[in-house]
Image: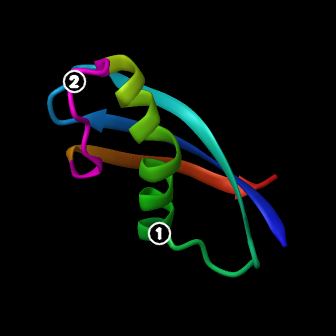
């Protein structure tokens, strides 16, 4: 099992704030599936970030978030 790190930017369709961050995950080596990684980042990081920023009165949906992965590497 290898640990990887990714640098990414997340944007929301309505919330005018960018999340610039890193994300770590484990996988069994091989090629990094960027679509799978983008969805994992949305689900495990960006969704929580935008819910925190937007507050309890705005329903943040995963489909409203876009993720750009800038760089990945083994950790």
Q: Secondary structure at mark 1?
A: helix
Q: Quadrant of residue 13?
A: top left
Name the one closer to the observer, 47 or 56. Answer: 56
Q: How far from the left and from the top, in percent, is residue 66? A: 29, 46
Q: How far from the left and from the top, in percent, is residue 70? A: 49, 46
Q: Residues within 10 Å of mark 2 (few under 14, many from 20)?
A: some
Q: Residues within 10 Å of mark 1 (few under 14, many from 20)?
A: few
Vertical side of 47 occupied by 20: above or below? above
**Residue at point 76% right, 78% down?**
28
Give the side of residue 26 with respect to residue 6, left or right: right
**Residue at point 73% right, 57% down?**
4
Q: How far from the left and from the top, in percent, is residue 64? A: 21, 44
Quickly name the residue at label 1.
Answer: 36
Which label's residue is closer to the chain start, 1 or 2? 2
35 is within the stretch colored magenta: no
Q: Which mark is residue 15?
A: 2
Q: How far from the left and from the top, in percent, is residue 52? A: 41, 22
Vertical side of 57 occupied by 26: above or below? below
In the rendered image, the residue lying farthest to the left is 14
59 is within the stretch colored magenta: yes
Q: Which residues are magenta?
A: 54-63
Name the one closer to the observer, 58 or 22. Answer: 58
In the rendered image, the residue lying farthest to the front is 56
Vertical side of 11 occupied by 71: above or below? below
Give the side of residue 52 with respect to residue 15, left or right: right
Q: Quadrant of residue 29?
A: bottom right
* Alpha-carbon span between mark 1 and mark 2: 24 Å
**Residue at point 48% right, 29% down?**
20
Name the one closer to the observer, 58 or 34. Answer: 58
Mark 1 touches mark 2? (CB < 8 Å): no
């Amino acid at each position: 099992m290898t640990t990887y790190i990714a640098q990414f930017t997340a944007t929301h369709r309505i919330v005018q704030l960018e999340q610039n961050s890193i994300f770590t995950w484990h996988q069994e080596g091989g090629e990094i599936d960027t679509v799978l990684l983008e969805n994992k980042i949305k689900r495990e990081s960006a969704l929580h970030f935008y819910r925190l920023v937007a507050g309890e009165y705005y329903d943040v949906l995963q489909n409203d978030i876009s993720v750009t992965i800038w760089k990945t590497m083994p950790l």
